[in-house]
Every structure is written in structure tokens, then in C-alpha cells.
Image (cartoon, rainbow, N blue to C red):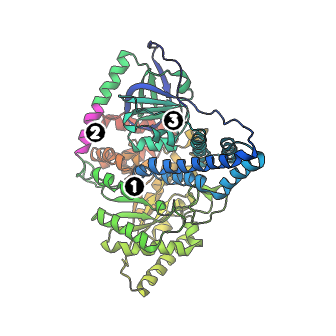
């Protein structure tokens, strides 16, 4: 697995600059620790009938070891990751616990008289080939299954992956592709930065790196082949650049940048209790996205004034039964009390797509991200939806919970959902349970149809929340999980900006506030523009709260409005980006725009 070339006396090479994709910000300087691209297949070996029980036992022991590794290495960081974490854990569990799949592997061992590692490898490979052909999110899942295959095969063969235990200093991990299990096998305290040949911003290992605050650049193509262990490396996660064997001038520049950013982070920490208020006195509600309840401490620590998006999918994943009303009530109630007096926006479950719980049978679909998911499941399985709504209403006796409906694409869907919410209230009343009658309800604008219907939707709800991740993807017909066209996923596309502005205006014309909870909300280059466009609320990852607050507090709203009017007249991404950068550079000397 690891680079096993004989150690040579180190001789520095000339400086090389490589360009990739930023997956986790900040700057790291350290020595390279090269991880080999382990793709050596398990070889087919004929076994006798007497050896079959032994091979089956080796398979079962290997699976159990992988399950224990999953619990030990992945669960402790659950509160630090994003929504993708749910899907990752679910993929691992499904593969390791799927009786049908494992039964097929065992049958292959028995019928073809082959060794367990080869049989398991072949079945996983067949499955991953089908996923890769489907592309997008499925291709990312295929990478995770490759990770599982490697773990189980190594367990069967008795191999032990190396780690960084013998290293006393921090290193830069260099790899073809950093899989989650490999990442978690390392002592992350000894990892300063990461650079990989392949991968994207939404890859699971990139999310892990961001959770731990490790600067990461991906998509560098052949860095794992070009670099040597002990080479000095700079990972610039802000610019998406890796410098191999930096010269004295370059090294001095990056060390100075590190010192500046350390002082800057101290300054940002002093803003924790201050409001997100522009220089001319306009307040923006700055909230945090919440993936798991363990992340509440980060929400509070970074100074967010509420939770603008509480993703509830984790309550449904990793279990064989649906969560009960009381189980959900306990969770929502605890979060509501912790965040008082600040609001908590609870998004009803957005299952389906790439998140398949064992408790709901979701049939295979050609385009699952456009298929039976989110509100569509809720309307066809109203008992699931009503249970969740009842739990939220009961927990809202503190008065700070709000309900957010995802994936609405038609007024008829919204009216059906509102009717089910009324039904949930009626049921609670009949059961003599205490609940909040006037709980606010909003709609996530993440489908182009909803954006065009924003005025009609706003007439029926209390607020709108723009989910840019899916909205941009659907508006531009770009699968953001497809590396070949990922460059076309551009939030500064003029069509995207005009749609966002139209949604904000539609909400305001109907007297409701409009927020944003997608990745664009955390893009520091977009903050002043969004303020100028009239956004009322921004919800970002907890770690992004201080920097977005800094920008808001250093921006005059009337100047941002002038910028927005200018931007909305432009027709190319290049013009828009250059104009925004010029505006931001004049006002923010400490940022790299």
C-alpha cells in the first residue's frame, strides 16, 4: 500500500508548481508522505472442497473486522462532517451487512472452489462497474466500495496498513486517491495537508479533511507519481495549488502567509458575540448548518445566531426501523433548548437520491437525484411525514423551531404538505399532546420550477430558503459529481444570479424573509453580492461563520447594492468574477481573492 522504495540520500529538486482543485482551505507546509496506489488485485487460487469452510470463515471474520473498524474509526467524527457523511456510513453498512450480497460471495466460493478474497473482490468489482457506468454520485459511491473491497481483502489476507505512528512531525499526505478508511487509519494530528491525483470537493475524504481543518488540494493528476517521500511540499488550499520543493522565496512567502492567517483567525475569534451587521447598520441573520447534534458545540463556539438548516436524515440512516415520534421529539427538543433564543430551521427528511435508509424501500432509478426523494416520498408515505411533523410541533413549545420543506416543485405539492401538517396538528390535539400551533413553515427553493413559482409559494408560507447546491445543478444541467464537467458548475453564472435575485424579490414582495443555505452562502467572494441582492439570512458550516461575519461587518449595504445592480447587468462568468474580485480586493486586504 505504502511507498516501499529503498531510502536514498535526499537531494532537493527544483521547485514545481501544480494546479488542482481546492477541497479544504488554508496553507500547510511539510514533508511528503507518499501513499502508494494500491490496486493489486487478489489472485484467483483454486481450493479443495475441504478448504471451503475455512475460506468462508476467513470471509466472515474479515467482514466483522471491517464492521468494527467502521464503528471505531468513523462514528467518533460524525458530528464534524456534512450531509455526505450519512451516505458514506450507509454505503459501508449496506455492503458489510447485506445478507444477499454476502450470500452470493459464499456461493461463489462453494460453486467455483475459489479463495475468499478473490470471490469478494470479483463481486464488488461487478457492482462498482455498474455504478461507474451510471456516473455522478454513483461514481463516488463506487470509490467507497473500492475502499471496502480493499479493507476486506486485506483482512482476509492478513495485511496491516501502515500508519504515521513512527513519525514525530507533521506530514503532507500524497496519494492517488485518499479513501476514508485510509484517512481514518492515520493519526490526523500528524497530517498537515493532503494532495491527491483525483477527487473533487464533494469526495468523502475531502469532507473528512475539511472537518479536521486539514488544507487539501485534489485533482492534481499525477502528483503521486511525480513526488518523492521527503520532498518538501506546500499545500495552498485557498488557491488550489501545490508547490513541490519550494525555493527560499516561495517558502518565505507561504510562511509569512501562515503567520498573517494565524493572527487573522485570532481577530475573527473576537467577533463571536458580535452581530453580523453592515457598516451602515443593516443586520443579516447569520446561522449555521447542522448535520449531527454533536456539532452543536461548534455552532455555539463560532458565534452562529441559530441553525438555518438542520438536516434530519441521520435519524433515519444506519437503522432498520423508522425513528419513532418520541425519538425524534427528544432530539428536536434538545436542540431547541440548546439554541434558545435563536431559531432552528428543521428540514423534513430528504431521503432518496443517494441516501437510502434500510427502513424505506426505494426502488432503483435511472436518475435518482431527479427521482423519488424528499417531499415526494413524504407525500406518498404520509405516515412517515406526519410522524416527523408531530415530533417537531411538540418540540416547538420553546417557540424557536421552524419547518422547512425540501424539493417542492409545484403548488399542488406544497398544498398537500400543508394539509398533512394540519392533519398532524389535529392528531396531536385529539391525543391531548402539547404542541406549538403557530409553528412557521418555509420552502426550500432548490428546483427551477420552485424558483419560477416563488411568488405563489411565498403567499402560502412564512419564509423561503434558497438551496443553491441543487438549484445551480438543475439550472445549469451540470452534475457536480462529474469531474469532466464540474468546471461548468458555476454559481456566478449570470442565469443563476438572476434567478436568485428573482426569488429574493418574490419573497419580499409577499412579505416573507428569504435565506440561503447552500454552499454559495459560505463563498466569501459572494457575501457582499448577496447582501446587495437583499438576502435576509445566510446559513453556513460552523467553521465558515467567523469569516462571513467579518465580511458582512466590513461591508456597507448601500455599496453592496450598487455592486449587485452592476453584476446583474453582466452576461459572462468572467466579467462577473472579475468585477466582484475588484470590489472585494479594495475592501479586504487580508483575503486572497
Mark 1 and mark 3 lie on one chain; the one further toward the N terminus is 3
Reading the image, the residue beneath label 2 is 265
Q: Nearer the viewer, residue 346 or 140?
A: 140
Few, some or many residues within 10 Å of mark 3 (<14, 14–19, 20+): few
Q: Residue at 65%, 42% (x, y): give it.
A: 117
- Callout count: 3
Q: Is residue 425 left or right of residue 198?
A: left
For residue 289, the mark is: 1
- Residue 511 visible within the image: no
Mark 3 and mark 2 lie on one chain; the one further toward the N terminus is 3
How far apart in space, not on screen, are marks 1 and 3 (Cα)?
35 Å
> Which image quarter: residue 486?
top right
| The residue stretch that appears in magenta | 260-270
How far apart in space, not on screen, are marks 3 and 2 (Cα)?
36 Å
For residue 161, the mark is: 3
Q: Is residue 53 left or right of residue 292?
A: right
Q: State the quadrant of the C terminus.
A: top left
Q: Is residue 269 magenta?
A: yes
Q: Nearer the viewer, residue 215 or 71?
A: 71
Residue 300 position, x and y percent, is: 29, 54
Residue 421 position, x and y percent, is: 47, 76
Amino acid at each position: 500500500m505504502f511507498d516501499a522504495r529503498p531510502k536514498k540520500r535526499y537531494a532537493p529538486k527544483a521547485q514545481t508548481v501544480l494546479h488542482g482543485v481546492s477541497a479544504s482551505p488554508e496553507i500547510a507546509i511539510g514533508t511528503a508522505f507518499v501513499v502508494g496506489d494500491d490496486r493489486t488485485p487478489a489472485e484467483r487460487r483454486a481450493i479443495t472442497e475441504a478448504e471451503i469452510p475455512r475460506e468462508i470463515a476467513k470471509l466472515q471474520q474479515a467482514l466483522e473486522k471491517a464492521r468494527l473498524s467502521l464503528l471505531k474509526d468513523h462514528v467518533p467524527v460524525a458530528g464534524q462532517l456534512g450531509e455526505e457523511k450519512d451516505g458514506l456510513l450507509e454505503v459501508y453498512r449496506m455492503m458489510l451487512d447485506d445478507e444477499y450480497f454476502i450470500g452470493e460471495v459464499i456461493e461463489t466460493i462453494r460453486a467455483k472452489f475459489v479463495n475468499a478474497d478473490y470471490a469478494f473482490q470479483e463481486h464488488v468489482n461487478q457492482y462498482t462497474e455498474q455504478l461507474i457506468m451510471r456516473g455522478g454520485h454513483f461514481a463516488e459511491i463506487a470509490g467507497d466500495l473500492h475502499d471496502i473491497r480493499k479493507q476486506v481483502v486485506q483482512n482476509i489476507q492478513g495485511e496491516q496498513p501502515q500508519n504515521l505512528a513512527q513519525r514525530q512531525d507533521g506530514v503532507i499526505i500524497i496519494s492517488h486517491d485518499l479513501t476514508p478508511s485510509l484517512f481514518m487509519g492515520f493519526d490526523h494530528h500528524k497530517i498537515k495537508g493532503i494532495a491527491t491525483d483525483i477527487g473533487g470537493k464533494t469526495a468523502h475524504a475531502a469532507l473528512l479533511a475539511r472537518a479536521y481543518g486539514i488544507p487539501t488540494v485534489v485533482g492534481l493528476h499525477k502528483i503521486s507519481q511525480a513526488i518523492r517521500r521527503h520532498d518538501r511540499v506546500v499545500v495552498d488550499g485557498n488557491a488550489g495549488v501545490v508547490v513541490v520543493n519550494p525555493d527560499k522565496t516561495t517558502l518565505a512567502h507561504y510562511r509569512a502567509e501562515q503567520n498573517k492567517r494565524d493572527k487573522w483567525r485570532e481577530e475573527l475569534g473576537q467577533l463571536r458575540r458580535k452581530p453580523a451587521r453592515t457598516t451602515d447598520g443593516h443586520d443579516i441573520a447569520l446561522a449555521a448548518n447542522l448535520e449531527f447534534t454533536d456539532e452543536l458545540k461548534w455552532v455555539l463556539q463560532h458565534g452562529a445566531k441559530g441553525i438555518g438548516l438542520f438536516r434530519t436524515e441521520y435519524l433515519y440512516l444506519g437503522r432498520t426501523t423508522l425513528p419513532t415520534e418520541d425519538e425524534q421529539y427528544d432530539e428536536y427538543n434538545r436542540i431547541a433548548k440548546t439554541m434558545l433564543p435563536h431559531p432552528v430551521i428543521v428540514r423534513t427528511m430528504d431521503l432518496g437520491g443517494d441516501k437510502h435508509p434500510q427502513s424505506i424501500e426505494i426502488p432503483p432509478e435511472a436518475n435518482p437525484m431527479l427521482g423519488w426523494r424528499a417531499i415526494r416520498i413524504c407525500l406518498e408515505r404520509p405516515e412517515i411525514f406526519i410522524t416527523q411533523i408531530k415530533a417537531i410541533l411538540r418540540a416547538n413549545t420553546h417557540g424557536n423551531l421552524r419547518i422547512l420543506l425540501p424539493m417542492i416543485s409545484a403548488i399542488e405539492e406544497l398544498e398537500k404538505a400543508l394539509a398533512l401538517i394540519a392533519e398532524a396538528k389535529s392528531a396531536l390535539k385529539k391525543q391531548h399532546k402539547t404542541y406549538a400551533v403557530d409553528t412557521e413553515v418555509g420552502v426550500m427553493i432548490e428546483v427551477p420550477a420552485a424558483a419560477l413559482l416563488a411568488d405563489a409559494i411565498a403567499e402560502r408560507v412564512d419564509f423561503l430558503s434558497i438551496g443553491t447546491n441543487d438549484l445551480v445543478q438543475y439550472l445549469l444541467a451540470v452534475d457536480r459529481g462529474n469531474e469532466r464537467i464540474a468546471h461548468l458548475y458555476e454559481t456566478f453564472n449570470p442565469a443563476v444570479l438572476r434567478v436568485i435575485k428573482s426569488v429574493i424579490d418574490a419573497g419580499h414582495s409577499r412579505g416573507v424573509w428569504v435565506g440561503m443555505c447552500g454552499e454559495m452562502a459560505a463563498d466569501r467572494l459572494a457575501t457582499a453580492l448577496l447582501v446587495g441582492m437583499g438576502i435576509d439570512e445566510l446559513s453556513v458550516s460552523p467553521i465558515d461563520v467567523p469569516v462571513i461575519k467579518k465580511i458582512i461587518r466590513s461591508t456597507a449595504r448601500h455599496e453592496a447594492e450598487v455592486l449587485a445592480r452592476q453584476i446583474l447587468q453582466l452576461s459572462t462568468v468572467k466579467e462577473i468574477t472579475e468585477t466582484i474580485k475588484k470590489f472585494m480586493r479594495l475592501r479586504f486586504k487580508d483575503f486572497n481573492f
